[in-house]
Image: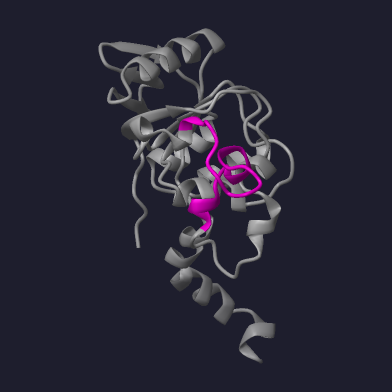
Amino acid sequence: MALEKITQVSGRGVPVPGDDIDTDRIIPARFMKCVTFDGLGEFAFYDVRNDEEGNTRAHPLNEERYAGASILISGNNFGCGSSREHAPQALYRAGFRAIIAEGFAEIFFGNSTQLGIPCVCASSDDINTLRAAVEADPQVEITVDLNEKVVRYGDNSVPCEIRDGARSALVNGKWDPIQDLLDGSGDVAQVASGLAYMSGK
């Protein structure tokens, strides 16, 4: 089954400002006791969105005006901390399909790419301008264009960067290595049949 070629992602944005937002903040460890990743979305950023009694706090992700946003806007070193895959999985299941930040932690970036979530970098000034535009009009449509390496919103645009390997994987539909392996199962079987320890000869 061919994977979707992700050349651009469009949607509304939500600002979650701050540097060094780690994976434990994205998905607290106590919610990781699961067999599958299904249902993790409701617990994304749980401890910063809710108090100890479960009452909602003031947080952009709790604001009705940002409901349905699919592009997250943040600061530097996003996704740092532990290497838990649950963090990008939670964001994906919360409806996010792209992340714009000043920078990303290495493993989080890789895990996100393998889910088909482009993580693009923009300068601090450009992110501040984008965030201000979204805060002024949460309905403004944002497009992350991987071909042009630009983020467009309203009548404005800012340059963005993404590592060449990740960009190539996304735009060519090669972002999931497991699916790549499944797609090549015929070739795998053919090679295996010629191996003495596989054929029993």
Q: Residue furthest bottom?
A: 201
Left or right placement of residue 29 versus residue 96 in this view: right
- The answer to whether 157 is drawn above or below residue 174 in the figure is above
- The answer to whether 3 is drawn above or below residue 172 in the figure is below
Residue 17, image x, y percentages: 56, 23
Q: Residue furthest right?
A: 82
Viewport quadrant of the C terminus: bottom right
Residue 123, image x, y percentages: 54, 13
Left or right placement of residue 95 versus residue 194 in this view: left
Residue 146 appears in the figure: no
Left or right placement of residue 104 versus residue 171 in this view: right
- The answer to whether 151 is drawn above or below residue 11 in the figure is above
Magenta span contains residue 45 = yes
What residue is at 45 percent from the left and 52 percent from the top? Answer: 93
What residue is at 42 percent from the left and 15 percent from the top? Answer: 130
What residue is at 63 percent from the left and 22 percent from the top? Answer: 76
Magenta-drawn segment? 40-60
What residue is at 49 percent from the left and 15 percent from the top? Answer: 127
